Image (spheres, grey):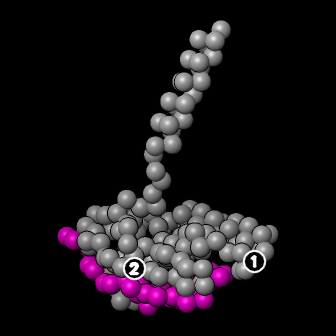
Amino acid sequence: MQKLTSLVISCLLVFGVAACDNASKTSESAPANPNEAPEAPSARTTEASQQDAQSELRRRQLNEDIRAREQRNNATGGDANRATGDLASEVRSKLEANIPGGQLTVSAADDGTVTVGGTVPNQDQIAKIERLSKEIKGVKTVVVKATVAQPKS
């Protein structure tokens, strides 16, 4: 019986280690540092991203996600207890839904400052970044470090 118990515990531990080994990523092509711009995306990648990001289903999903986070934030004390990870994630979702073809990274600081880096296909989309980011509750300042990079053909 003792050997069977040891075997079961060992199997659970091995399974747990294997399951926890996969780190989650927001985007495989997003740069790790918001101050660095990634290479311009290919035309095919940009078109696929644009179709996904502009689909009505995707927009509804992102808006519901933002709404749920806002409700959770209000339930836990509002802006005073805002987690920087939640703030960055909400801004990232908002930008993903409204700036198709962009490869953006978002980082947030405790003081409500959000830094957005990466690339977008045109200057009009750079102009949208600050306005869209400030629509998220808790964002006080937006630093835009994104650049224009046309998709590769």
Which quadrant: the C terminus?
bottom left
Q: Secondary structure at mark 1?
A: helix
Which residue appears farthest toward the front when viewing the image? 2
Q: What is the x, y in percent for residue 83? A: 64, 71
Element type at marker 2?
Answer: strand
In which quarter of the view is residue 42 placed? bottom left
CB contact under 8 Å: marks 2 and 1: no
The structure residue drawn at horizontal position 31% and vertical position 76%, both measured from the top left corner, is: 37
Q: Residues within 10 Å of mark 1 (few under 14, many from 20)?
A: some
- Lower sequence index among marks 2 and 1: 1
Q: Amino acid at mark 1?
A: Gly
Question: Residue 139, can we see it?
Answer: no
The residue under label 1 is 78
Residue 53 seen: yes
Q: Which residue is at 35% across, 89% downward?
A: 123
* Image vertical order of residue 36 relative to residue 31, above or below: below
Horizontal side of 116 relative to 132 (left or right) equals: left
Q: Is residue 22 above or below residue 108?
A: above
Rendered position, 131 above or below 59:
below
Q: Residue 110: image x %, image y %?
A: 60, 79
Q: Measuring from the top left, give residue 145's x and y in whole percent.
A: 38, 85
For residue 133, the mark is: none
In-front residue for pair 30/107: 107
- The magenta span reads 125-153
Identify the residue at horizontal 39%, vertical 79% (top origin).
Answer: 117
Few, some or many residues within 10 Å of mark 2 (<14, 14–19, 20+): many
Q: Looking at the image, which residue is at 65% across and 8% down?
A: 1
In the displayed structure, does residue 15 sit left or right of residue 69?
A: left
Which residue bears the numbered disc 2?
117
Q: Amino acid at mark 2?
A: Gly
Residue 57 covered by magenta stretch: no
